[in-house]
Each structure stands twice: as structure tokens, then as C-alpha cells.
Amino acid sequence: MAEWFHRTIVSTGRLPLFCFFVGVIVGFGFIRASVRMIRARVRWWPGNVTPGGLHIHHVVFGVVFMLIAGVAGLMMPASPTPWRAAAAALFGIGSALVLDEFALLLHLSDVYWSEKGRTSIDAVFVAIALSGLLLLGMRPVSLNDFLQAPTDGVKPWLAAALFAIANLALAAITLLKGKIWTGLLGLFIPVLLVVGAIRLARPHSPWAHWLYVRPGRRNERKRALAAFRERRFRQPIIAAKIWVQELIGGRHDVPLPRRPRR
């Protein structure tokens, strides 16, 4: 195991990325355990930070950690990997604290325990998934990949520009069709973008609204088929995802227990 870790992670220069990955998981696990104990009113747990009655959300601590780690990483030379790894771990913890309150930043409202608060868990899942793919050695398709692709007599820069535009267009279509995970993973595996762009849009996506529902462009067959696929295939997956979210983060829209009167 130690030999594999050194060969796969340390020797390839991925130790800081590995520490960031672990930092995100540890930070997210800690803060979710903390807020659940706060919500359960566990007496021995410190609870919320409320100096003078001001509730300081943990996103504030996350921003501070990210700033400290980011500046430290910029100041450090490239050679001392352990210090860079430590800064990356702190940056990962800070990122977890910020992403855990992503819904608050998005809605500018404390929706942590509402249905909208599930967006925060989605954001953390995306961060873990993307950093995990990078850790495994996968890289998003870059301009260099386009430049190195066979051009069949076409000028390399022109072919690269066309490939890049096509890739971005497919990614945009996939995301507009409501296929977020397909669009994100497609940045690493381009064939997924082709599949996502060709397949039907999700019923409540902008693409479906524009082309399946909007007057003048109504397509009842595609609308019905998209709704059937959402109900038959997508909703069980969403139910499983919500179950996992509630297992990790706690059930949403549950009122806080009242303190017993003394």
C-alpha cells in the first residue's frame, strides 16, 4: 500500500491534490457531524459561535482558511512538497466549509435546513468527484489536446479552435438540458457530451421549456417522453440521492426540538 501510494501519488506530484481531496472530505464530515449535534442540542458540544448574539456561519471560517492556505501556497517555493501539501489540506477544509453553505451564498438566505439546502451537498459532491477524477490522473480536455489532434491538412490552430468551439457547444447544450453530472464529467470524457447533447432534455430544464413547452415550439411527443423518462428512471435515482443526502447531512425541513422548560 505504501509503495503504491508513493508510486501513484507522491512520485507523480499529486500529494497536494490528495491532501486537498482528503481535506474536503474531512472538513465536510466534521462540519456535518457538528451541525447535527448542534441541532440535536447535545450538551457537551460547543454549539454555534455567537459572540454578542451574532451567529457566525462556518462559511466565514472556510473563507479565512482558504485565504490563509492560498496565500501560504503562493509564498512557498515549489520544492518543499510537505508544506504545499499542508496548505492544500487546509484549503480543502476551508473549501468544504464554504461549499457546505453554498445554498446560503446562492440564495442569500439561511436555507440550510430547507429543501434548497440540498444544493450545498450537491456542491460538495461535485467538488469531491472532480478532485477525485483529477487525483486518478484524468484531465479535462484542453487546448493542447485539440492542437495535438489529427487535422488532415487543416491548419492546427484552426482545427483546435473548431474542436474547442464544438466541445464548449456540446457542454452548453448538455447543461441546458439539465444534465449537470453528464456535462461536468463530459469535460473529462468528451463522448459523454455527445450523448448528453443528443438525448432528450429533462422536463424542467431550460432546453425543454424553450423547445418542448414554449408556445410556437411545442412538441408534445418529446414533452411526454421526457416526462415519462423522468418519472420512470430519473425519480428513483433522485430519491436514492436524497436518501444519501439526508443520511449524511440530516433530514431537511424538520423543526428544531424545543428546549425543555426549567
Image (cartoon, rainbow, N blue to C red):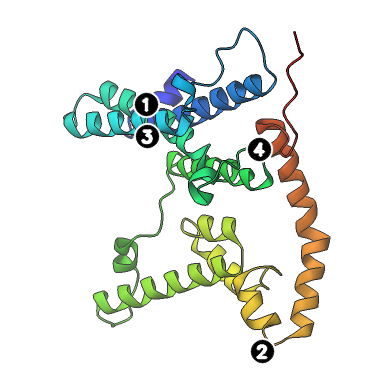
Q: Earlier in the sequence, mark 2 or mark 3?
A: 3
Camera-nearest label, 1 or 2: 2
Distance from the alpha carbon under mark 1 to that under mark 4? 26 Å
Q: Amino acid at mark 3?
A: Val
Camera-nearest label, 2 or 3: 3
Give the secondary structure at mark 2. loop
Residue carrying label 2? 217
Q: Earlier in the sequence, mark 1 or mark 2?
A: 1
The answer to whether the residue labelled 1 contacts the one labelled 4, judged by CB atoms less than 8 Å apart, is: no
Camera-nearest label, 1 or 4: 4
Residue at x 78% of width, y 84% of height? 220
Q: Is residue 72 left or right of residue 138?
A: left
Q: Amino acid at mark 1?
A: Leu
Q: Nearer the viewer, residue 181 or 217?
A: 217
Q: Amino acid at mark 4?
A: Trp
Give the secondary structure at mark 4. loop
Give the secondary structure at mark 1. helix
Q: Nearer the viewer, residue 176 or 148?
A: 176
Residue carrying label 1? 90
Distance from the alpha carbon under mark 1 to that under mark 3? 11 Å
Mark carried by residue 204: none
Quadrant where the image shows the C terminus = top right
